[in-house]
Image: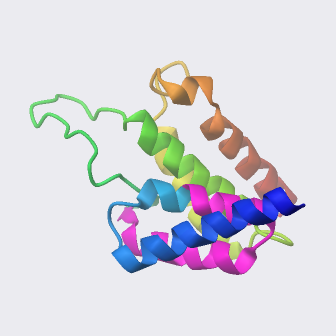
Amino acid sequence: HPVVSKALTCLESSWKTIQQEGNGNFVYTKALLAYAFALAGNQDKRNEILKSLDNEAIKEENSIHWERPQKPMQSERSLYKLQAPSAEVEMNAYVLLTLLTAQPAPTPEDLDVALRIVKWLTKQQNSLGGFSSTQVSDFPQSPYAMRGFKQQMQEQ
């Protein structure tokens, strides 16, 4: 369809601009672009953006996640670890969905990274199993992504 082709051309242009300007300030945009290209079936572009995201990943113990460089800072005096801002949860859910949208199927490496994202996302849930009360609760990408991961693991 011509409209979809034009939209993908626009997204490719955005990706080229991000590549020219460097890493750091575009983590959320990269997550969205990777998912859009995955849904469009452009696995080469999906993989290229995932590789770029991997360079910016925060890898801790058995988990992995991404943060926006301009996110609000947490108080050093907090007695407990605060949940990540909703934008971080949503962004990581998009990376998870990207990994699970591989064609023809996610690789073992995709599933390994997906598991590490799920571990981080699980730590961000509140006591009722949800996430911070913002767009994430209205736009359920995180629970959707985690259900998708569970289905992929059951198929393996």
Location of the N terminus by quadrant is bottom right
Q: Quadrant of residue 12?
A: bottom right
Q: Nearer the viewer, residue 118 or 133?
A: 133
User: Where's residue 89, x and y in %?
Assistant: 48, 41
Going 57% across and 24% down the picture, which residue do you hit?
Answer: 137
Q: Is residue 59 magenta?
A: yes
Q: Nearer the viewer, residue 94 or 77?
A: 94
Going 80% across and 59% down the picture, which residue do you hit?
Answer: 4
* The residue positioned farthest toward the right in the image shown: 1
Q: Does 12 sit above or below residue 2?
A: below
Q: Main secondary structure of the magenta part?
A: helix
Q: Is residue 73 left or right of residue 134?
A: left
* The residue positioned farthest toward the left in the image shown: 77
Going 28% across and 44% down the picture, which residue do you hit?
Answer: 71
User: Where's residue 53, x and y in %?
Assistant: 47, 69
User: Where's residue 20, x and y in %?
Assistant: 40, 79
Q: Is residue 68 magenta?
A: no
Q: Does 76 sit above or below residue 120?
A: above
Q: Does 126 sit above or below residue 123?
A: above
Tell me which colouring the rendered structure shows: rainbow
Q: Is residue 130 in view from this perspective?
A: no
Q: Is residue 36 in view from this perspective?
A: yes
Q: Nearer the viewer, residue 153 or 107?
A: 107
Location of the C terminus by quadrant is bottom right
Q: Which residues are magenta?
A: 32-60
Going 32% across and 65% down the picture, which residue do you hit?
Answer: 24
Q: Quadrant of residue 136?
A: top right
